[in-house]
Image: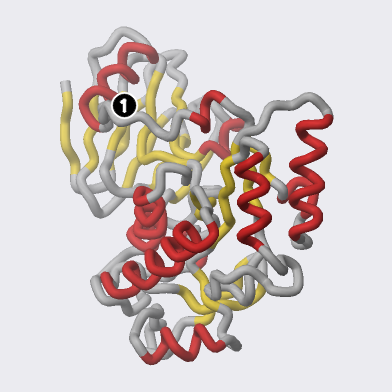
Amino acid sequence: MVKMYRESKKIELLPDEKWWGGRVSDGLLMPFGKENFETDLSLDLGGNQACPLLLSTKGRFVWSEEPFSFKFEDHLLIVSETAKIEFGSGFNNLRDVYRHVSATYFPPSGNLPEEQLFTAPQYNLWIELLYEPTQTKVLSYAHSVLEQGFPPGVIMIDDNWHEPYGTWKFHSGRFPDPKSMVDELHGMGFKVMLWVCPFISPDSLTFREVEKKGYLLKDVSGQTAIRRWWNGYSSCLDLTNKESVSWVYEQLDFLQTHYGIDGFKFDAGDLPFYENTDQSAERATRNDHCEAWGEIGLRYKLN
């Protein structure tokens, strides 16, 4: 049985009923139901690992295509939102209700991700090099992997391989000959990915070029939005603007055709870096902006 709601709904918990879902970062607090808990999936997804879905051991579920807020208190599950909420019941257990929800709302497409992401290791250089990747260090790491008897796989060159954020060109001091580096990594059997984000450093030539083209988000006052994130202050690409999306593709496609880069790690773009009042080419919520950045990655098999 499935019911739909467009307003706050109080659901009385059944005896010994336990609930899971929402943000993965709240996993240590699950199952929900015994103690008070409250969160809003439209404000912060805890590192973008979340789903607008709640499941119960009594075969009940709450689902929406949009983020919603919910809380558990006084033996009640209280769900409130502005979009359509679907509440279902009548399934035998947690497994059965999950299978129903999966088949109904997000069935598998039949398309497989890049096979090497599952059949070979993924070496992320952030763990060892942090903000200081260089051509010499990347090649040294790759050679060490093979010397220690590990197989080649996907190697990810992380943050700071580039010029200022949004200028997706290899830093000439740290990477004097990136084409030869990528060729050598390929020759060793590695695929190569680069880290990218949806931000533009505001004191860069790239910023001056894209701002006048209207590729950046504006705040509620109509000024170019400058947001604090973990690497300082940056402007945000407006990825509801098709021209902005085309510009991103041009930068990334060039890295593939000119240097042989195989794919990209799409980082940041989290909900807290946007406001629902931001002015963009198309009206969008925080969640919409976050999703638009994720959709950029669908162009590339290694993402």
User: Residue, x 24% and y 22% (percent of image)?
Assistant: 103
Mark count: 1
Residue 158 locus on image (x, y percent): 65, 55
* Depicted 225 relative to depicted 105: above or below: below
* Depicted 18 relative to depicted 191: above or below: above
Report whether 148 appears left or right of 91.
right
- Quadrant (top left, top right, bottom left, bottom right) of the N terminus: top left
**Quarter of the image holding residue 159?**
bottom right
User: Residue, x 19% and y 47% (percent of image)?
Assistant: 6
Q: How is colour applied across the structure in the image?
A: secondary structure
Q: Nearer the viewer, residue 257 or 46?
A: 257
Q: Nearer the viewer, residue 155 or 159?
A: 155
Q: Which residue is mark 1?
A: 61
Residue 260 locus on image (x, y percent): 52, 54
Q: Nearer the viewer, residue 133 or 239?
A: 133
Residue 284 locus on image (x, y percent): 29, 66
Report whether 55 appears left or right of 103.
right
Residue at the limit of the structure toward the top, as seen here:
92
- Three-letter code, disc 1: Phe
User: Residue, x 58% and y 56% (percent of image)?
Assistant: 195
Q: Residues within 10 Å of mark 1 (few under 14, many from 20)?
A: many
**Quarter of the image holding residue 212?**
bottom left
Residue 253 locus on image (x, y percent): 42, 61
* Depicted 261 relative to depicted 186: above or below: below
Q: Secondary structure at mark 1?
A: strand
User: Residue, x 21% and y 26% (percent of image)?
Assistant: 104
